[in-house]
Amino acid sequence: AESELIRAQRFESLALLAGGLSHDLRNLLQPLLLAGDTLEDYADDPRLARLGTLVRDCGRRGLEMVSSMLSFARGARRAEQVKLGALIEALNLLLQGSVPRTVKMEVDIFDPEVAFEGNHTELQQCLLNLCLNAIQAMPDGGTLRIETDVVSLPEDFFVDVEPASPGRYLRLSVIDSGEGMTPDVLQRLFEPFFTTKAAGTGLGLLSCKRIVASHGGLMRVRSQAGEGTAFHLYLPLRTEDADHPDPQAMDASLQGE
Ligand code: ADP
């Protein structure tokens, strides 16, 4: 599972780079294209007009390259019906051999039949990242808990400065009783290449965040040095996905966050 993780993280950082680069390049190329076009149309001197054509064509070709780079960055990302039970089962399989005897694993799935639109592989990768981090945070053993439930986010649930869209979310939690994090680590957690590990990539959580965001979801972390860490992923459920009775309009643990 570890080597697969490293491979996925490498790809992820490449995709991240390609995505960022294409975005910036597009912003550069678009005005260039426009300038070439204008020059071609309005230049009195035919040599200048030809220069305009050249600039426009190069700009256009550049934009084409950028859009193929962008589709690479997005990957052949398929939206599919993800089944909660199958997702957790796949995760369990990937974790086999990576959970030391000293770590007790607890899985609590409220309903394996819950299905929602998303990408199975990406979410599996994301949960695997979180679980391996959790295991690494428990060198002396402990408990790794995976919990799922459906919650309604209140209107005043903010993500950074943006209010989260209110509605029903599937919450996936990965909770460990490990070393936890100090406030300064907690603050830098999602920075690219930020790691406290000798052999860390510092890309795992960034990649998780990106995956969750591409599902229209959000991520929350709670951690206490010496006590443990809880990562909560909130994935939006469309009304037709959430044909479940609301367990509680809002559960209390959210309110403190
Ligand atoms: P990496 O695992 O390669 O260091 P991540 O982006 O996954 O990269 O994590 C960044 C840092 O966040 C880790 O180096 C570690 O300090 C901290 N961290 C992540 N998950 C946990 C956890 N469950 N418990 C304690 N610290 C954590």
Image: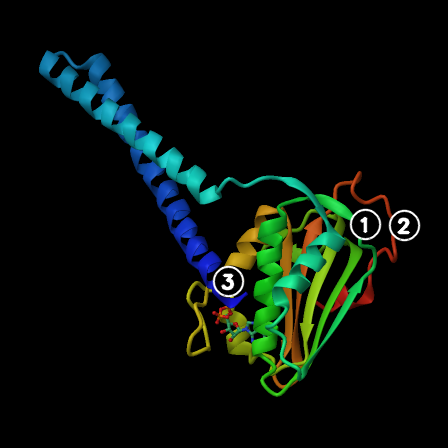
Q: Is residue 72 above or below residue 52?
A: below
Spatial CA distance of label 1 from label 2 is 14 Å
User: Which residue is identified by label 3?
Assistant: 5
Element at label 3: helix
On the rendered image, what quadrant is the N terminus found in? bottom right
Q: Is residue 24 above or below residue 197?
A: above
Element at label 2: loop
User: Which residue is identified by label 1?
Assistant: 113
Mark nearer the viewer, 3 or 2:
3
Spatial CA distance of label 3 from label 1 is 27 Å
Which disc is residue 36 wearing?
Answer: none
**Residue pictured at 69% horizontal, 72% vertical:** 175
Say which amino acid is labelled 3. Answer: Leu
Q: Is residue 130 visible?
A: yes
Nearer to us in this view, 255 or 132: 132
Where residue 44 sits in the image (x, y, percent)? 14, 11
Where residue 79 sits in the image (x, y, percent)? 62, 39
CB within 8 Å, label 3 to label 2: no
Say which amino acid is labelled 1. Answer: Glu
